[in-house]
Image (cartoon, grey):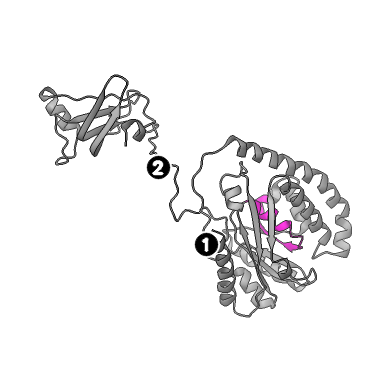
Amino acid sequence: MEVAAAYPSLSLLHLRSRKSSTHSSLSRLCPYKGLGCSAYNQAVLRNPYSSAQNGFQCITRKRVGFSWPNFDLKLNRRCYDIKFSRNVVVRSQLAGTGTPDAAYPLSELKLGSKVRGICFYAVTAVVAIFLIVLMLVGHPFVLLLDRYRRKFHHFIAKLWATLTVSPFLKLEIEGLENLPSSDTPAVYVSNHQSFLDIYTLLTLGKSFKFISKTGIFLFPVIGWAMSMMGVIPLKRMDSRSQLECLKRCMELIKKGASVCFFPEGTRSKDGKLGAFKKGAFSVAAKTGVPVVPITLVGTGKIMPSGMEGMLNEGTIKVVIHKPIQGHDAGELCNEARNSIADALGLQS
């Protein structure tokens, strides 16, 4: 590996090799004794713009070769003494590669993805402003005729999600025949990788209630639409709020509505499937309704968690599994998680 490649962020490299006159100073600079870093065979790399005293780093190489325009210099077992400030970032040539266990290999942020992200949010905002008017007009009738399922509002939400996603992404849905009928209440559970998961699930057109953080309801337009759809608020760190949320879910199911959970509790940071919480499965076990597992593939790569400002190209695949039913929350949890995990494994 060339020195210039190993330390590309250092703007100026000073290479010094001194004889006996600097024996003591070079020995002092290299704290690693017994590594072959003699006073006669030391090369010092310095960042001249560094003023902070952050110490030195000694790196031993058996053989290092690098070419400059006027001469070639070969070093055997040389000791490199590096001094740099905290603001200097030293990157290896391997910094862009992913490990076999990584779900999303690291990649450079592309301008095209950022532009697509801006266009995505522009489209979703414009569509939402127009469709919220239809929700507001129909809301009194929804409260009178369909207070619990609110199918009209969910139809509007499906239009919003479809019109937003279609210009940018391709959706592939597998297992539509496994979806219960609109009049059958159920508990839907899905893996959670991205902000796009909500859009993707809304395109299915099922009138299930999501569970959302209370802070989201404060956003204009989106928060209003969520309130009219009957989205269930939750304070994550409040045990009383969690209990009230589960009670509300059971009440809605008994009235004929469906509920959708993300059992992991939050979005996955690395794409791996996290542990499932049993709240959703307790609701299903106590009410006797089926659990419908759904696997979302690709949303985390297209819009990674923590990078919601960009939108990569790609295809989102939705796998709807066969409903499972039972009265043991633990068994339902394990079976649902295994179904989702298997589908993710096949697609990886």
Q: Going 15% across and 40% down the picture, which residue do you hit?
A: 33
Q: Residue at x 76, y 46 (%)?
A: 221
Whichever of labels 1 and 2 marks the residue nearer the N terminus, that label is: 2
Q: In this picture, which residue range is highlighted in magenta?
A: 195-216
Give the label on residue 274, or none.
1
Q: Kindly tell me whether residue 56 is visible in this rendering.
A: no
Tell me, for residue 343, which label it has, or none.
none
Query: Dot 1: what SS?
Result: loop
Q: Residue at x 58, y 69 (%)?
A: 339
Relative to 251, is 263 on the left or the right?
A: left
Is residue 223 found left or right of 308 in the rendered image? Answer: right
Please tell me in which quadrant of the rendered image residue 307 appears.
Answer: top right
Indicate the quadrant containing the N terminus: top left, top right, bottom left or bottom right. top left
- Which picture quadrant has residue 309? top right
Residue 144 at x, y percent in the picture: 88, 63
Percent position (x, y) of residue 304?
A: 57, 48
Residue occupied by mark 2: 94
- Which of labels 1 and 2 is toward the front? 2
Observer-nearest of 32 and 299: 299
